[in-house]
Image: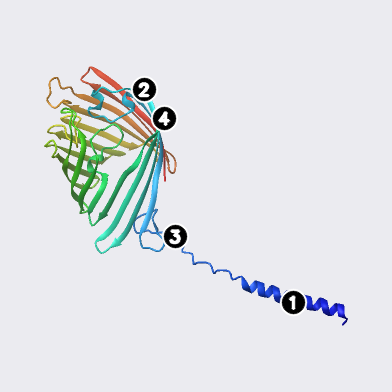
Amino acid sequence: MNIKSLLIGSAAALAAVSGAQAADAIVAAEPEPLEYVRVCDAFGTGFFYIPGTETCLKIGGFVRFQVGFGRDEYGSLSQDFLRSRDHSDWDAFTRGHVNFDARNDTELGTLRSFIALEANAEDQGRNGGFGIDEAFIELGGFKVGYFYSWWDSGINGETDSLGNVTRFNSVAYTYDGGTWRAGASVDEIEGYFHPFTLETHHNVGIAGTVGFSLGGVNLDVLGGYDAGVEEGAIRAILSAELGPGTFQLAGIWASDPNAYWEASEWTVAASYSFKATEKFTITPAAQYFGDLNFDGAGSPDMWRVGLTVDYQIVSGLNFKGTVDYNDINGDDDFVRGFLRLQRDF
């Protein structure tokens, strides 16, 4: 071995040792253990466990594009159509809605919290309102928070009007015995504008409901008392499976206008919803409003007939169209409706 070979070999050995020492100086951190999201099937489809907890969460919502046409762009049908308002032939809007449903089992039953956020995009980039649609806590049949009351439910289709104010800050209790059920709530009525006195009040309301289901027949009876105006209303809805569809009949009587019902002294509505195909549903309906001014001078009546169609384009994407004809005391009539495209997730 000559001197040149010895020097080259020594340099190579030193480089190898230096490289090993440099490599030893850099210590890579061990990867953190990854907890994969687990499916939670205890409360239905769509729930998953929040990592590190035993709480199940479901995220859902929808995006809706709708074009309304006719009187008041398909607004609320109560006393509004008798008031002086600006009328437009049509109006379009887009709505975004997202909700978070969290649940877990406890020794007192299922503990649930629910939050729904909603916003409407109106014309010229204006935001038509963004905020809480619902937010509540449930445990053992008790429910507290801001949520839709039983008055928000109706019959099939989009022709009927069977409620007035339908969301409150409330405390409610519901008992479900399977074939029968009952519930009661105390509702904060804040800022309700009375259509005759033209006054607003801040008070409480009390609502109660009983119902039963048996052999394809369902009956729900609901009552509400508005302490601010000392008036109330009672409503009943009967549903029955009949032939290829579902027949529904509803009726309301009110002592005078109140937060729960103000459109008329009494009303009767009916609808029949049937599936023409697996994806296509047709619902004709009618409603009669008796004594719009609650025994006031020259109090008119009103009747309405309408048709709603629903079509599932693909899974998660649905089309709804509705139109109704309204006649007030034979002196005033108008047509309203809307076309809606909605993507649910």
- What is the spatial separation of the Cα atoms under label 3 and label 2, in whole angstroms? 50 Å
> Residue 257 appears at what percent x and percent y?
16, 32
Q: Distance from label 3 to label 1 (Cα)?
A: 50 Å
Tell me which numbered mark, 2 or 1, is placed earlier along the sequence: 1
| In the displayed structure image, the side of residue 132 where residue 189 appears, left or right | left
Seen at 17% across and 22% down, the residue is 300
Alpha carbon separation for disc pair 2 and 1:
89 Å
Q: Position of residue 269 (x, y in %)?
A: 22, 32
Q: Earlier in the sequence, mark 1 or mark 4?
A: 1
Between 70 and 16, the one nearer to me in the picture: 16
The amino acid at mark 3 is Val
What amino acid is found at the position of numbered circle 4 in the picture? Answer: Asp
Q: Which residue is mark 2?
A: 89
Q: Quadrant of residue 141?
A: bottom left
Labels 3 & 2 near each other (Cβ < 8 A)? no
Q: Which mark is residue 14?
A: 1
Local secondary structure at mark 4: helix
Mark 3 crowdedness (10 Å alpha carbons): few <14, some 14-19, many ≥20: few
Query: Disc 2 on helix, strand or loop?
Result: loop
Dots 3 and 1: beta carbons under 8 Å? no
- Residue 275 placement, left or right of 31: left
Q: On the image, which quarter does residue 45 sit in?
A: bottom left
Is the Cβ of the residue at disc 3 closer than 8 Å to that at disc 4?
no
Front position in the image: 2 or 122: 2
- The reply to whether dot 2 and dot 1 touch (C-beta < 8 Å) is no
